[in-house]
Structures are given as structure tokens and as C-alpha cells.
Image (cartoon, grey):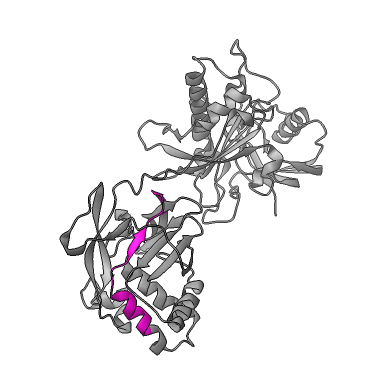
Amino acid sequence: MVAIKFTFTANRYHATQWGRHVNEGVLEWPPSPWRMLRGIVATWRRTLPELPSERVEPILEALALEYPGFHLPPASTGHTRHYMPYNEGTRERTTLVLDPFVAIQPKKSLFAVWPNVSLDSQQQSDLERILRNMPYLGRAESWVEASIATDHPKPNSCAVESGLFPEGDWEVVRTLVPHSHIGLKELQVETSELRVEGRIDPQGAHWYPYVRRRDCFTSFQTDRPRRTARSEGATVVRFALSGKVLPMAFDTLRWGEVARKAAMSKFGRQNDGAASEALSGKDAAKNPLRGHRHAFYLPTDEDGDGRLDHLTVWAPGGLDASAIRAVFAMEELAHPKGQGDPLQLAYQAHGKADDFIGVSRLFDTSKRWRSLTPYVLTRHRKRDSDSPEEQVAREAALRWEGRRLRSVRVKHPRKHMAPMRQGRSDGFRPFDFFTYRQGGGSNAGGAFNFELKFEEEVCGPIALGFACHYGLGLFVPSCD
């Protein structure tokens, strides 16, 4: 008997069934014996070229003589979406690529078992050396630790022998297996060679029916992060944004308002229509709160591609248990215009602001800060006083006692505000952001790109000016 144990260190197996396009999302489960043999060959050639083929080929031939059985660990399914660039003539476009995967229960392993195959001591030693060097099985994201197993659980997926179908709740899947008299040349065939020959299936393999439990993808459901009322007092909750098309960074204000609505809606449903002062920014009489201690809803582009990819809910005064429950319950944001697809919210973490130093530049420490989104004036400028520089300096002094500004510099209005991190986007101009607000715009007008310099290092987040609770007037440390 030969049994191989595969432990996927990231608890994910990425592999699309042979001949299917990745965007079809057809997962290969169990892993095909053809893929496993090719993985053994690739690992041998790349990491142990000193092993002669005369010692490796008999191992491959022995494993090809029998259809292995599998013990599939408890698993679920998932996928990620990526917008990959490609050139269409002289224009660069993006195309959606899905990456489906099997999510495996942590600390559980997959076993492949050949009950009637026997290897001598030298062959077992050689196979163990190769398996120990195997970096992944499937796509490169499927990091794996492989080894020969001396013991294994009972198989729960096997080849259908002689057309006999086992009793129970099973389903049949097509699985690519090697021919019994496989050669090394056939196992090393490249996809490009098959295309030249006009073939899809390799000559050294054929399809064979396997059975697996019908509930093999529902026997394990990935747990959502545990987010309970014991988190009371947290000031920060972070989400990643996902969707068919992520919104542009200059739509920060739109999505900041949508996030506030979503949080208030969740709170109302959970609390018999009541409202939260911390989430709404208004007291019981619906008067605006003072002091800016209530929640800021800050959509941000943190990879520099010009599109919003994170949402930070930051409440300097803290969130009580009921407010925390409402924020945790947020799973999507409806499109502001009601016509597009919603954005999905993937919870990342929560805690105090200090916990996020080094995680997001919003929470970094610096003496110099620059505009990430435009500062919009809250009051009209006077002819001889109350300049934009004076307004932002006054607001900073009122907002934070002890944060003394040394200088305030206005950059040219046509100068783009750089993104948080260097990427494909060059940023946007101040007035690109200020194009919409559901409740109307600032009566004072004027959107500015500032650089602030403090006497001492200060910690973020820094958000000032009109609509600062929805993502405008946001600053990040300056690296200029």
C-alpha cells in the first residue's frame, strides 16, 4: 500500500478541472491522479535533478497502475475576483478573472491511497524526498506539505469500479487519470504543445468516473470572524470592499454616506427603530452632536489603483455594544444611485486606533500630513481674512487641543492629490471629488489640497472640513 498525505498550509486548494476555463468556476475535487503525478515529476525535475530517471520512472509507473482512493477533508467553496489588465490595441483595459478554490477545514489533510501498490525501500525513500520538496499542488496559491503516510482515514471518494455505484448519497465527477502504461514524456507535456496539436486532453490520460459525498462542500462552513458585544468600546472597525466593479476614489463622499445609512439601518432593525447617537451623529432631538466624537465613515483607496477598496468606521468616542453589533452586521452597501451592483463588505478587524498603526496609513504618526481627499470650506471666505489656510488652522486647533500647527500650505488646485500608496493611479484633483452630495453641498464652496506641518508628531486619523465624517478632508502622512 502507498498513501500520500497532503496538508494545504493556507487551507485552500486552487485547481480548475482540466479543459475548463477558470471563469467557469469548476473545481477539481478530488485532485486528479494525473495532476498529482505531474506534480511529482515537476518537483523532481526542479528540485532533485540528481535523481536519475531510472529510479523515478518505476515509481510513476507503479502509481499509474491503480486508481487511488481519497479521503477528502471537510471543505467548502469560495472564490476571489481580480480585474487583470490587458492591451486592446493601444488602450489598456481590464478583464474579470475568477479564482475558485476549495476551502479546507484547518488542521485537516487530504489522503490519496493506492491499496494494491507496493514500493521497495529505495523507491519509498526517493518518493518521500520528492514529496518533501513539493511546494504546491494545483495552482501556485495551493501551498502544500506532502509526505508518505503510514496511516490514513477511510477513503470517502473512489473510482467507480465496473460500473458499480456505492449505496448512499453520492455524486459522480469526471476525473483525469493517467493511462496504466504512462511514459515520462507524456507526463511532461505542455499545454502549448496540446494547442499546437489541436488537442484538449493529453494523450497520456483519460477521463474516469469517481464518486464523492454529495455534501462534500457543505460539511464545513467557514466561520465568520467572531464579533460580539464584548468588543464594546472599540473605536475602529475595518472592512475590505469587493464587487464586480469597485467605485472610483473620487466617489468617496457618495459611498461614505451610503455606509452611514447602512449602519443606521442595521441599528434600527436591531433596536426597534431606535437611532444611535454614535452612528448617526445626532442626539435624541436630532440635533447635530458637537466635538466630532461620533462615527466617521472613511472609504479609501489603499493600493493606489484609483478605486475604493476599504471602508474604515472610526468613532473617536467609542462604540457601545449595540452600535458594534450594527456595524458588524453590515455585509453590503447598496449602490448610491440604486441602479448598480452593491459593494460587498468583508470584515477585517476591529479595535482601538493604536492597533492599526502600520496597518493603514490613516493611523500612522507624522509631523507632516497631506490631503488624500480635498478639504472643503465650511464657511465663506472674507475679503481680507478667514482664508482657507486660516480656516483649516482654526479647525485643527479647536478639534485637537495640543496639536499645534507650524504651517499650512495650499497646493495648486490643478495638482493631483496623490493616492495613499503608489500604484496605477496618479490621484485626482480636489474638485473631482466634490461633484455630489445627497443633502446638498457646502454653502461656502472651495475644495483645497493642503499640506499641514505640526510642531510635534501626531497620530491619525486626521479628517477636517465639510463632510469629513464621510471621507472628505482626509489627510495621510506626507513622504514628499
Residue 428 in the image: state x and y as whole percent. 54, 46
- Which of the pair 25/220 is nearer the observer? 220
At x 65% / y 43%, what residue is drawn? Answer: 362
Q: Is residue 62 magenta?
A: yes
Q: Is residue 41 left or right of residue 416?
A: left
At x 70% / y 54%, what residue is drawn? Answer: 479
**As drawn, which residue projects farthest toward the top?**
285
How many marks the image carries: the answer is: 0
Q: Is residue 208 magenta?
A: no
- Which of the pair 260/105 is nearer the observer? 105
The vertical placement of 385 against 456, above or below, is: above
Answer with the quarter of the image where residue 109 lies: bottom left
Answer with the quarter of the image where residue 379 lies: top right
- Which of the pair 283/447 is nearer the observer? 283
Residue 411 visible (yes or no):
no
User: In this picture, which residue range is highlighted in magenta?
Assistant: 57-82
At x 55% / y 17%, what residue is drawn? Answer: 275
- Which of the pair 251/410 is nearer the observer? 251
Q: Quadrant of the N terminus?
A: bottom left
Q: Quadrant of the C terminus?
A: bottom right
Answer with the quarter of the image where residue 278 lies: top right
Residue 397 in the image: state x and y as whole percent. 78, 31
Residue 15 in the image: state x and y as whole percent. 37, 61
Q: Is residue 188 left or right of residue 304?
A: left
The vertical placement of 459 against 424, above or below, is: above
